[in-house]
Amino acid sequence: MATFKEQVSLDVFYLDLLYAFAAMCVVLVVLGLCLVDGGLVRAKSMVDTWVLKIAAAMVGGLTTIFVGYAIWQWSFNTAFGVPGPLGQALKDWWLFGNNMTEFAGNLDPKKVVEADVNQVFVVFFMTFSMATMALIHSAVVERIKALPLLVTAAIVGTVLSPLAGYLAWGPVSPLTNRGVHDFDGVFPLYIFAGTVSLVFAWRVGPRRGVGAGGQPSAVERPPANLAMTGAGILLIMFALPFIALGSGWVFPGGGYFGISMTTSGMGIVMINVLTAFLAGGLSGTVIAYRERQPAWVFLGPISGAILCGALFDVAKPWVILIVALFGPFVTLLGQRVMVALGIDDPKVVPLALFNGVIGAIATGFIQWGTKTGGFVGLEGKYGFQHATITPWWQLVGVVTIMAIAGIPALLIALFFEKTSGFKVTDAEQDAGLDHAYWDHEPLHGRGVDVPTPAGSTATT
């Protein structure tokens, strides 16, 4: 029987279910990314694409449990005046800490408020690291070696992803407390992963037989299974609204607030997310027919959602409708820039980084003056909604997260380039990574040259 009944009340269990379901929906995003990439890569690298993406996600998620959540709790300890805030957070919330190993009902609510909810939120952070690594892998499919990606996953999960969350995703985070506003993980997920992806895609170079920006050359045109890609996008679209709902605070009888402690509501958040999908999907459809590229029907909804990710909790639906219409055009701009730079990444950087950065800064203008930051019950520099959203602090947040992501990514790439190698060899790409690493042969006609019987007119 529980010692502290308030830690296991029905209100607590309702919150547990909300955050647990939101966290598991992040895992669905990982599955969705597997399907998206599975439909776009050449069949001779299909198995390796799935294996390496899942492996990187697992390593990223696993390493987060060691100290990742403790880094985020550092900001709360600071705001609530806990002595030695970082050290105490590490003591309480690392893998072997008391708050991570004791049943919630046995923890004093005067010391650990809503202990069960906090423990479930640990899982949210783990799955966010999983999604971050799955997204990064999408930018370098068929080219990066396993070891550097898995080492990156360990570093991202242990330190970098939690540090990005500590700085810019939370009501009393250092940047949030000055006016930086986020909601749906634009800073720690999209901008962070997009920046690492930009560095990695630059360092590994284009795929063999594929030109700048992912455009297939005349030498080898990768077969695309757009049905698989479309299924992946729909799975992501199912998951994102629930992830958005989990990016907020619920005070039973007191209302719903965004992760930055902005006044919000679950109903408006749901309307906003679906509106962004549909508006982005409309623009994506227009681009698809103009460019004769059906993949834009799939990119459109996600583009709209990422561009509006920091607005879902504070903007009105008609504002989301207008902003989301520009999402696919921002992605198209990103693709054109990647082609101009000779970088083979038509997905992650144009989609996540371009929409994330532009959307974050646009939020500063659209919601300029909106109250944010602080925590209920606190006063002074951490007082409830003491800060205001401004465009210049949004820009500061963007630059900070890009630096935290980009500098370590470049150092990791340069280290492996000088040691065991960062990218697979040209011969391995030509043979297919399934053959090079897994002794797995693709079917005839699915992206690998196989002998054609004499007299046959069949081609690959």
Image: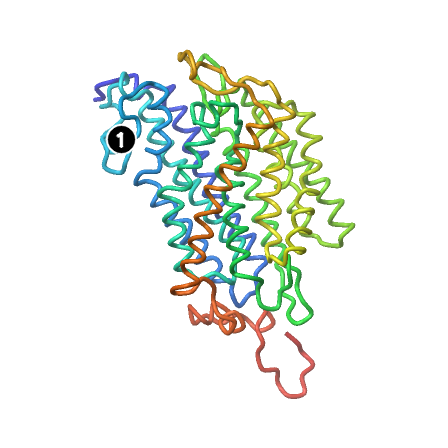
Nearer-the-camera pick, 452 or 384 = 384
Residue at the (44%, 40%) spot, across then down: 128
Determine whether, in the image, residue 181 is placed left or right of residue 216.
left
> Crowding at label 1, few (<14), some or many (≥20) Cα neighbours within 10 Å?
some
Determine whether, in the image, residue 353 is placed left or right of residue 161.
right
Residue farthest to the right, as pictured = 290
Residue at the (67%, 42%) spot, across then down: 330
Residue at the (41%, 24%) spot, across then down: 15
Number of dots carrying numbers: 1
Rendered-image quadrant of the N terminus: top left
Question: Circle 1 sits in a helix, a strand or a loop, which is it?
Answer: helix
Q: Position of residue 30 (x, y in %)?
A: 48, 47
Q: Position of residue 165 (x, y in %)?
A: 43, 34
Q: Is residue 168 above or below residue 298?
A: above
Residue at which label 1 appears = 87
Q: Position of residue 389 (x, y in %)?
A: 57, 22
Q: Position of residue 458 (x, y in %)?
A: 67, 78
Colour scheme of the rendered structure: rainbow
Q: Is residue 225 above or below residue 120?
A: below
Residue at the (51%, 65%) spot, across then down: 45
Nearer-the-camera pick, 459 or 94 = 94
Q: Residue 370 occupies which quadrant of the picture?
A: top right
Nearer-the-camera pick, 105 or 183 = 183
Determine whether, in the image, residue 209 is placed left or right of residue 109.
right
